[in-house]
Amino acid sequence: MARDKTIKFLRTTKSNLDTQKNANNLLAGEPYLITDENRIAVGTAVNAYSDMAKKSEVDAKKTDNVSATSRVLGRKSSGEGAIEELTLSEILDFIGSASKGDILYRGDSSWARLPKGTNGQVLTLASDIPSWASPSGGSAPLISIRETNFSTTSVSYVDSGLELSLEANATYLFEFNLVLYKNTSAGNIIFVLPTGASFGVMGYLYSGGSQVWGQSSNSDLDDRQISGGNSAYFKMTGKLTMGSTSGSVKFRMKSPNGDNFTLYWRSNMWALKQ
């Protein structure tokens, strides 16, 4: 490298330098001082040059602030372009094709996406790779709860708000609990099942009032009267077998005399798929 030669910069404006570039008048390696921008450029070909950043521009980039915490700088989309701020969520979107409910996990050499499973599935692990599977011993129990009083003067059955949606061709362990009822007059209750569904032999436990059910097996446990007593606990349990269509089991009430029939209750029913 010879040090006895003076490097000479050609003084020019940015506009003139571009004119010379378009006319193929530049030399590769030739330095230029762009006087109206106070920057240096170097020719890279007869029709191209590379201009250097000014110190003020470099200093400004060093002190630029991002808009908020937890941000990184990069590109949100493919291709070259200006630097942008990215959130963690936008970075994770680089995995691609993500949708609600998906899970991100670390594979052998990179991050991967596990698509969401279906309702009732659980997350399992095999060879350090997660996947979805049905839980052993059946699904999680389905539960319907009512924690407020219910009154009716209707002589026809009305929904109480307790309802469970069940699958077709499935067998469930079924349980119903009614805690602290108080009836101002006689009333009737019923369990209504989807077409083709039926209860097996239902056992019961009760205290106070009159007997509601003994053991019964039919498509609807129907038209059973609650009368007498101001409080009671009633529990019914057994098997419920669905037919070829899915549907809901509902708990309904009516007041056969048209007067006020009130249950002051805390009640629930649940079903566990076998």
Image (cartoon, rainbow, N blue to C red):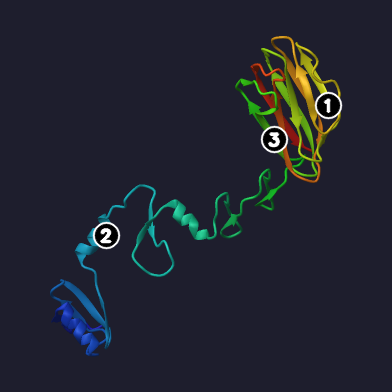
Q: CA distance from mark 3 to mark 1?
A: 18 Å
What number is the disc on residue 61? 2
Residue in the image at 69% along x and 18% along y: 179
From the image, tell me which residue sits under label 3: 164
Image position, residue 200 (x, y; %): 85, 32
Q: Secondary structure at mark 3?
A: strand
Q: Position of residue 6 (x, y in %)?
A: 16, 83
Q: Amino acid at mark 2?
A: Lys
Q: Are marks 2 and 3 in contact (CB under 8 Å)?
A: no
Along the horizontal axis of the image, is 181 left or right of 60?
Answer: right
Residue 259 percent location from the top left of the image: 66, 16
Q: Which residue is mark 1?
A: 202
Look at label 1 and name its amino acid.
Met
Q: Amino acid at mark 3?
A: Leu
Residue 65 is situated, as x and y percent measured from the top left of the image, at 28, 52
Identify the element where label 1 is drawn: loop
**In the image, which is nearer the foreground, mark 2 or mark 3?**
3
| Residue occupying the far top of the picture | 229
**Depth check, front residue: 56 or 70:** 70
Mark 2 surroundings within 10 Å by alpha-carbon count, few (fewer than 14), some (14 through 19), many (20 or more): few
Q: Nearer the viewer, residue 218 or 112?
A: 218
